Image: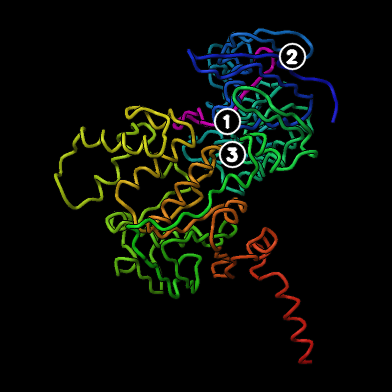
């Protein structure tokens, strides 16, 4: 792919004390393309984006826009040069209207009064283009997370940027909302807008981007057209190792590990119908299925968040389904949710507070009083054991996605779980953090834990699990293990509910009878 250069970066460097964030970073983005920048946390991609948005000033290096060297000494300077950025964390005012959020600090005024009519006229065609059909006078708090993300995007697009920077724009979106966003981004590309796209989700990078730059240790290590790359090559560039190195081998059972079993018979409720299986300690059981298939319903029932209509479940303690999340925690059952920011953490609280959150609420023994000294001990224990990059009193919202997820896992480890329900536990975290979380999951299993592992990333399921249960339209469509645990078989089963070749076999059988 070749074309006019929209923006180029040469030799950017940025240090924070003794920490090197950027060192000889180079980038060239062609006009009218979607250019992905990928790398582990700490690879330099976020600092690079903040430099281009005028939020961070580099120590050295040059930036050219349209062939001219520019100085970006603040966000206003970046906006004046036609650079807009949509951040991962939404910066909307929830109680203000959609219109008010679209025109923050730049409201059109007539005769000294803000003109809502002009605001509506200016934004109408753009909102239609984005497929955002909402009441613009309603507060943003009434919108879905996907609609809010589109409002954030619309706010930046109203400034008519030449270069649009997107930092993990779909990290909080579900599959349907992500597909909608990608349709919008492809339309913007066709309209001539150039985009820089930062994401941890490599499958999505390959589905939407034209060109990819890989960063590692503050430098660019490779830039190629997406069509010339494969996902394993990108991973190897990001971590300096082949993809297979991501998944640690199974560990031998710990000497103190107890043999435990979870039995599910005829479970029904929500989308589920007649689900039966057994899971035991020492193995990692994968759960695969399309969105809405019933995987989330199963995890919710096992954790006491949803009631079952029928069926029998026996946990290692000999009891049945928990009646609430609190009862589940008290019975050593834990759930690591897919959306850690809304369901797994208190973002405005410290690591220390989050780590103690479950054990203090679930325990039925000891002093009823909160002990700061004990809480500090818990936090230090998990920070050291899980290698969390943060001090005990640091707020959760100041951590990277990978470290936030480690805090979620750490708070559950404090109760000594016997059953681990893991719902997409590496969603939105970088490759390095994924490796560490995979290692933790191996340890959970080897120490006698029963692990049910759900993931939207098929390579994770195949690389980490001992066997995979596939749920299709609420029923258990099949189980794959051994040589059958390959992408073709699992994809076919999740999308059709049948093992590959089952349809042909059935037709052959019917033909024989005829």
Q: Tag 2's secondary structure?
A: strand
Of residues 323 and 414, which is closer to you in this image?
414
Label 2 sits on residue: 65
Query: Nearer the viewer's eye, disc 1 or disc 2?
Result: 2
Residue range of the region highlighted in magenta in the rendering: 79-98
Q: Is residue 13 visible?
A: yes
Seen at 45% across and 70% down, the residue is 278
Q: Tag 1's secondary structure?
A: helix
Query: Nearer the viewer's eye, disc 1 or disc 3?
Result: 3
The main secondary structure of the magenta stretch is loop
Of residues 337 and 373, which is closer to you in this image?
373
Q: Are marks 3 and 2 in contact (CB under 8 Å)?
A: no
Quarter of the rendering containing residue 314: bottom left
Label placed on residue 201: none
| Measured Cα–Cα span from mark 3 to mark 2 | 27 Å
Counting other residues with Cα less than 10 Å from the Cα at mark 2, is it few (<14), some (14-19), or many (20 or more)?
A: some
């Amino acid at each position: 792919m070749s074309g006019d250069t929209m923006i180029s970066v040469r030799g950017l460097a940025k240090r924070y004390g003794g920490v090197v964030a950027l060192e000889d970073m180079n980038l060239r983005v062609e006009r009218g393309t979607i250019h992905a920048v990928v790398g582990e946390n700490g690879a330099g991609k976020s600092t690079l984006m903040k430099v281009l948005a005028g939020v961070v000033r580099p120590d050295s290096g040059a930036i050219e826009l349209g062939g001219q060297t520019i100085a970006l000494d603040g966000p206003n300077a970046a906006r004046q040069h036609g650079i807009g950025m949509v951040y991962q964390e939404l910066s909307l005012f929830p109680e203000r209207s959609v219109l008010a959020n679209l025109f923050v600090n730049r409201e059109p005024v007539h005769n000294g009064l803000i003109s809502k009519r002009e605001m509506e006229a200016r934004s109408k065609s753009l909102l239609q283009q984005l497929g955002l059909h909402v009441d613009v006078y309603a507060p943003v708090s009434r919108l879905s997370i996907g609609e809010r993300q589109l409002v954030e995007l619309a706010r930046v697009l109203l400034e008519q940027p030449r270069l649009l920077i997107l930092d993990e724009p779909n990290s909080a979106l579900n599959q349907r909302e992500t597909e909608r966003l990608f349709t919008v981004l492809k339309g913007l590309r066709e309209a001539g807008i150039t985009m820089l796209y930062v994401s941890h989700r490599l499958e999505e990078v390959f589905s939407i981007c034209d060109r990819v730059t890989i960063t590692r240790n503050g430098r660019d290590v490779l830039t190629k057209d997406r069509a010339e790359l494969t996902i394993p090559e990108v991973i190897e560039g990001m971590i300096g190792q082949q993809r297979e190195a991501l998944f640690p081998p199974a560990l031998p059972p710990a000497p103190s590990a107890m043999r435990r079993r979870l039995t599910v018979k005829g479970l029904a409720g929500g989308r589920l119908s007649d689900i039966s299986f057994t899971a035991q300690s020492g193995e990692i059981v994968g759960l695969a299925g399309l969105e809405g298939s019933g995987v989330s319903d199963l995890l919710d029932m096992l954790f006491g968040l949803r009631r079952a209509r029928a069926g029998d479940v026996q946990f290692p303690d000999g009891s049945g389904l928990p009646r609430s999340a609190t009862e589940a925690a008290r019975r050593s059952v834990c759930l690591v949710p897919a959306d850690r920011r809304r369901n797994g953490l208190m973002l405005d609280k410290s690591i220390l507070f989050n780590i103690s959150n479950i054990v203090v609420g679930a325990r039925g023994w000891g002093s009823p009083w909160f002990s700061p000294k004990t809480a500090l001990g818990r936090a230090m224990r998990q920070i050291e054991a899980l290698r969390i990059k943060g001090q005990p009193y640091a707020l959760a919202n100041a951590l990277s996605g990978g470290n936030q997820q480690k805090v979620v896992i750490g708070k559950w480890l404090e109760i000594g779980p016997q059953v681990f329900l893991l719902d997409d536990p590496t969603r939105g975290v970088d490759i390095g953090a994924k490796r560490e979380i995979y290692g933790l999951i191996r340890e959970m299993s080897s120490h006698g834990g029963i692990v049910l592992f759900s993931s939207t990333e098929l390579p994770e399921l195949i690389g980490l699990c001992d066997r995979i249960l596939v749920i299709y339209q609420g029923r258990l469509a099949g189980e794959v293990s051994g040589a059958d645990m390959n992408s073709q078989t699992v994809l076919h089963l999740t999308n059709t509910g049948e093992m590959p070749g089952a349809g042909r076999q059935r037709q052959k059988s019917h033909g024989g009878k005829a």
